Each structure stands twice: as C-alpha cells, then as structure tokens.
Amino acid sequence: MKHPDFEDLLNEQSEKPKSLLKVHKAVPEAPPKALVLKELDLEGELLKQYQKAQEMFDDSYDEPLNQRAQTLNTITGILQAIIKSQQDLYNVERLKTLENTLIAVLQGFPEIKHSFLEAYEKELKKL
C-alpha cells in the first residue's frame, strides 16, 4: 500500500547527521604509553586535550545544542586546568627565586647566616 503523502520522503536520499563518536574514533588506535608520573608532560597533555576538544567542537556544527554545550564545557574545564597549572608553576618558580635571593643576601651577613638558616629550617619542619 502506497502513501502518496510520504512517497517523496522515501525517495529522498537524505544524508544522516554525523555524530561525534562516528567522526572521531571512540577507541584509540594504539594503547597509551606506560609512563612514569614524573615523566608526564601535564601542559602538553592538557594542550592535546584542548586541541581535540576544539576539533570536536568545530566538527559539531550539525550536532544538537546540548552536545555542543558539553563540548564547550569540556574546553572551558581544560582551559581552567591549563591556567591552574601555569599559576602553580609560576608560584613554585617564584618561591625558588625568593629562596635563592635570600641565600645570596645571607652570604653577605656571615655573622647571622648560620643562626638564621637553623631557625628557618626549624620553622620549615613544622609545615
């Protein structure tokens, strides 16, 4: 039984929308490398995640808005992690610079250097 109202719909060769999982492989081709944690480049890994999320967002123009919003939320989270990582690195580097400056200045005051460093170490152990 033919339906004249739906016949045009059946004959049309409409392209199915792509889903993000079909565009980007859900399973990685090669298993991730086993790394020692101290060898992990956090900034590099965050940058890779950001680039992948950005690519997914760029390719998702025909996806539902909720999926695009989820991708934007992921991008925002990655950027926040990158910012925090950079701030932490800055703080550590700043602290090292301050301590090195303190040691260099103390070299000019040998009479108080040893007593200061002993007191300094004692206070650091309390932390």
Image (cartoon, rainbow, N blue to C red):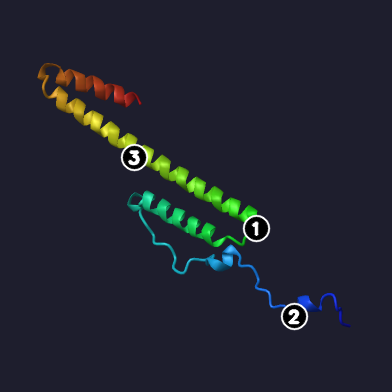
Task: Give the residue drawn at x 27%, y 22%.
Answer: 122
How packed mark 3 is, by other alpha carbons closer than 10 Å (few <14, some 14-19, many 20 or more), is few
Sequence-wise, which precedes: disc 3 or disc 1? 1
How packed mark 1 is, by other alpha carbons closer than 10 Å (few <14, some 14-19, many 20 or more), is few
Q: Nearer the viewer, mark 1 or mark 2?
A: 2
Q: Report which residue position mark 3 lands on.
A: 89
Q: What kind of element bears circle 1?
A: loop
Task: Give the residue drawn at x 68%, y 74%.
Answer: 14
Q: Nearer the viewer, residue 48 or 14?
A: 14
Sequence-wise, which precedes: disc 1 or disc 2? 2
Quadrant position of residue 51: bottom left
Task: Give the residue drawn at x 20%, y 25%.
Answer: 102
- Give the percent coordinates (x, y) of residue 90: 33, 37
Q: Nearer the viewer, residue 99 or 116?
A: 99
User: Tag 3: residue type?
Assistant: Leu
Q: What kind of element bears circle 2?
A: helix
Mark pair 1, 2: CA separation: 26 Å
Mark pair 3, 2: CA separation: 61 Å
User: Tag 2: residue type?
Assistant: Asn
Q: Nearer the viewer, mark 3 or mark 2?
A: 2
Q: Is residue 122 above or below residue 57?
A: above
User: Tag 1: residue type?
Assistant: Pro
Quadrant position of residue 23: bottom right
Is residue 63 toward the left or the right of residue 85 in the image?
Answer: right
Q: Quadrant of the C terminus?
A: top left
- Give the percent coordinates (x, y) of residue 88: 37, 38
In the picture, the disc for residue 64 is 1
Sequence-wise, which precedes: disc 3 or disc 2? 2
